[in-house]
Image (cartoon, rainbow, N blue to C red):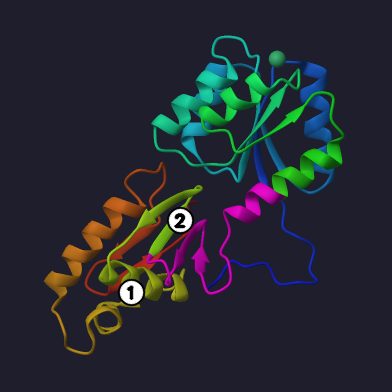
């Protein structure tokens, strides 16, 4: 089913990874976000922060620029090199064009200059998360979206172009997620009734997996032997 948020209900909390070495700033951000219903994980140096970010499972990363062991720019670059598209909000000490441009060049999505108001931080995180959510006409589940008009999937902020067949399969899987979609239904969705056999389906699912799962830390598309396939959120 679509993970679009129904209007009128309080927005669900975000899972935020905070990478900040200054204890007081980290504690302030952490307290504020948790009081606002978000889930916060904290690392105080760049090496630990990168390892945690690479394990995945976050809606956004709040990343300080100056960090011990590995600075924020290098961390962001290594995260992107590893294929991670999780939204990154960078914290900088000074508002210099140079810092901003370097941050964006290394793959940061937004930045805030210290000191900042905590509600502003939350608003920016929400905006980043919305960019990673399904838009009108899209279908999405567990952070994976598909736009049938553009034949493009999106995961962790990354656009993934699909073939028409792959798109039809993903569309059928996302609409039913996390339920199992039987082989025959998937074949009908992609080729039309009786249009292919399960071997052809297997080949297409293999290719779809290589695009939507393999570059990421957690697989979403699972096979149910002899029955079909399903998309489930990571445990
Ligand atoms: Ca710092």
Q: Is residue 33 in the magenta section?
A: no
Image spot of residue 101 (x, y percent): 60, 26
Q: Nearer the viewer, residue 127 or 21?
A: 127
Image spot of residue 73 (x, y percent): 55, 21
221 left or right of 175 in image: left
Residue drawn at x 38%, y 54% is: 160
In the figure, 19 relative to 150: above or below? above
Q: Nearer the viewer, residue 221 or 122?
A: 122
Extent of the magenta region = 127-151
Count neighbours of disc 2 (C-alpha within 10 A) and say few if under 14, some if 14 to 19, many if 20 or more: many
Task: Answer with mark 2 or mark 1, whichever residue precedes in sequence.
Answer: 2
Task: Residue at the far top: name it.
Answer: 69
**Label 2, label 1: how many angstroms apart (C-alpha)?**
15 Å
Q: Is residue 139 in the magenta section?
A: yes
Element type at mark 2: strand
Does the residue tagged 1 have its C-beta within 8 Å of any atom of ligand 1? no
- Mark carried by residue 168: 1
Image spot of residue 207 (x, y percent): 23, 57
Image spot of residue 226 (x, y percent): 22, 72
Q: Which residue is mark 2?
A: 154
């Amino acid at each position: 089913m679509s993970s679009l948020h129904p209007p009128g209900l309080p927005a669900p909390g975000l899972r935020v990874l905070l990478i900040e070495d200054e204890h007081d700033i980290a504690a302030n951000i952490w307290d504020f976000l948790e009081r606002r219903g978000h889930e916060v994980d904290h690392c105080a140096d760049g090496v630990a922060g990168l390892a945690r970010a690479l394990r995945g499972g976050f809606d956004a990363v709040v990343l300080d620029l100056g960090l011990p062991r590995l600075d924020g720019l290098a961390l962001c670059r290594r995260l992107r090199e590893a294929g991670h598209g999780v939204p990154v909000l960078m914290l900088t000490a000074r508002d210099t064009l140079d810092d901003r441009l370097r941050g964006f060049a290394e793959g940061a999505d937004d930045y805030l200059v210290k000191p900042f108001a905590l509600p502003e931080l939350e608003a920016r995180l929400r905006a980043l998360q919305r960019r990673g959510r399904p838009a009108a006409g899209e279908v999405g589940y567990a952070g994976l979206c598909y736009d049938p008009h553009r034949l493009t999937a999106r995961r962790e902020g990354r656009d993934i172009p699909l073939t028409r067949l792959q798109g039809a399969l993903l569309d059928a899987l996302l609409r039913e997620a996390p339920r199992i979609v039987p082989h025959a239904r998937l074949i009908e969705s992609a080729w039309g009734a009786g249009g292919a056999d399960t071997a052809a389906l297997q080949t297409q699912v293999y290719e779809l997996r290589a695009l939507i799962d393999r570059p990421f830390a957690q697989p979403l598309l699972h096979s149910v032997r002899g029955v079909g396939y399903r998309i489930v959120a990571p445990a």
